[in-house]
Image (cartoon, rainbow, N blue to C red):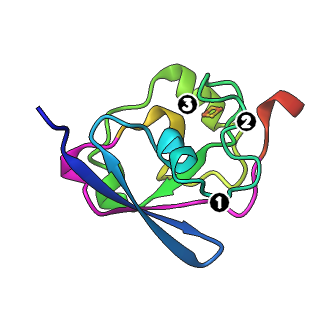
C-alpha cells in the first residue's frame, strides 16, 4: 500500500521551504532528498555522531514525537542553541499525524566531532 504523504515546512533564515515526504522518512533524509541547502546539516549522515541535524519543533508537534533515546539526548546536549523542543532530525520520522509540521533550522550548527 502507498505510504501516506506528509508535508513538511522547513523554516531557515526566516524563509520557509515546503516539501513533500512520505510517512516513515526522517527529517534529515527529507532535507537531503529535497536539496535543502543547510550549512553543515547532517554531517554524520544520521549515525548519531554529530548533532548538526538539530531541529527545533513547535511545542504541540514536539509533544507528539516518540521519546528520544539516551543516545540522542547525549548528542543533543552538544547541539548549538539547544531549546526545550529540540530534537535531532535524523532521529525523527514523520507520520501522517504530523502532516503540515514546521521545523526550524537553528542559526548555527556545532559538529560534536570537532569538540
Ligand atoms: Fe549527525 Fe543526526 S546527522 S546526529
What span is colored magenta in the figure? 94-109
Residue under label 3: 73
Residue lying at 35% horizontally and 49% vertically, measured from the top left: 21
Residue 106 circle label: 1
Query: Which quadrant of the rendered structure holds the N terminus?
Result: top left
Disc with the residue nearer the chain's start (3 vs 1): 3
Residue 39 in which image quadrant: bottom right
Alpha carbon distance from label 3 to label 1 = 17 Å
Disc nearest the viewer among 2 and 1: 2
Asked which secondary structure carries label 3, the reply is helix
Mark 3: give few (<14), some (14-19) or many (20+) Cα within 10 Å: some
> Which quarter holds ligand 1?
top right
Is residue 88 visible to us here? Answer: no
Mark 1: give few (<14), some (14-19) or many (20+) Cα within 10 Å: many
The yes-or-no answer for disc 3 within 8 Å of ligand 1 is: no
Disc nearest the viewer among 2 and 3: 2
Query: Which quadrant of the rendered structure holds the C terminus?
Result: top right
The yes-or-no answer for disc 2 within 8 Å of ligand 1 is: yes
Amino acid at each position: 500500500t502507498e505510504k501516506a504523504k506528509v508535508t513538511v515546512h522547513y523554516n531557515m533564515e526566516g524563509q520557509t521551504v515546503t516539501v513533500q515526504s512520505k510517512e516513515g522518512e526522517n527529517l534529515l533524509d527529507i532535507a537531503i532528498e529535497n536539496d535543502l541547502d543547510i550549512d553543515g546539516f547532517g554531517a554524520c549522515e544520521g549515525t548519531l555522531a554529530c548533532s548538526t541535524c538539530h531541529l527545533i519543533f513547535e511545542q504541540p508537534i514536539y509533544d507528539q514525537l516518540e521519546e528520544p533515546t539516551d543516545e540522542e539526548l547525549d548528542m543533543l546536549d552538544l547541539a548549538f542553541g539547544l531549546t526545550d523542543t529540540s530534537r535531532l532530525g535524523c532521529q525523527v520520522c514523520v507520520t501522517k499525524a504530523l502532516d503540515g509540521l514546521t521545523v526550524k533550522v537553528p542559526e548555527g550548527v556545532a559538529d560534536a566531532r570537532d569538540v
